[in-house]
Image (cartoon, rainbow, N blue to C red):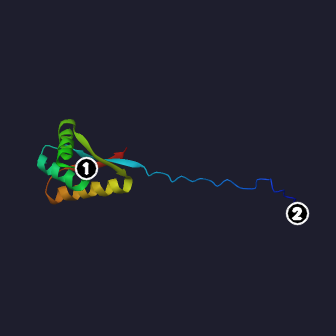
Amino acid sequence: MANITPNQDLAIKPNVVKPKLPAMFKVLLLNDDYTPMEFVIETIERFFNKSREQATQIMLKVHTEGMGVCGVYPQDIAKTKMKQVLMHAKESQHPLQCVTEPA
């Protein structure tokens, strides 16, 4: 058996495992010439918890630039929000499109 003296440091440094942050995804609304602006604003307020003013700004960006970011979320949440928006638009008979892309 090996002789161990009290001043020897036998402590093993624990590996510090930092949890890996999930990949983030942008949820984007795409412009079309048929969906009413008011519907887009209400959709942004409802599904992305934005104020009326924030939703209006996003809608204007969609209208003038062709797309606008409604939020940035982990992939599963982004996909869920996209599906909710698409289902809501379809139920309301609007062609509003929503997509996700890596942030």
Residue 36 seen in render? no
Question: Residue 30, percent across and down?
Answer: 23, 44
Asked whether disc 1 touches disc 2, contact meaning CB atoms under 8 Å apart, the reply is no
Please, what secondary structure does the residue beneath circle 1 have? Answer: strand
Q: Quadrant of residue 57?
A: top left
- To which quarter of the image does residue 79 belong? bottom left
Residue at the extreme front of the image, as rendered:
6
Q: Residues within 10 Å of mark 1 (few under 14, many from 20)?
A: many
Q: Earlier in the sequence, mark 1 or mark 2?
A: 2
Residue closer to the observer: 13 or 64: 13
Amino acid carrying mark 1 in the image: Cys
Instruction: Kindly state the secondary structure of the residue where label 2 is placed.
Output: loop
Of the 4 image quadrants, the one containing the N terminus is: bottom right
Q: Name the spot of residue 41 as percent of width and height, x first.
A: 16, 49
Please give the name of the residue rendered at 59% of the width and 53% of the height, measured from the top-left corner: 16
Please identify, in this view, whether the residue under mark 1 or under mark 2 is nearer the observer.
Answer: 2
Depicted 63 relative to depicted 46: above or below: above
Image quadrant holding the C terminus, namely top left
Where is residue 31 shown, x and y percent of the image? 19, 43
Residue position marked by numbered label 1 in the rendering: 98
Please report the residue visible at 39 percent of the width from the left and 48 percent of the height from the top: 24
- Where residue 55 appears, as percent x and y from the top left, is 19, 46
| Residue at position x 20%, y 49% in the image | 51
The residue wearing badge 2 is 1
Q: Is residue 58 left or right of residue 13?
A: left
- Please state which amino acid type lies under the numbered disc 2: Met
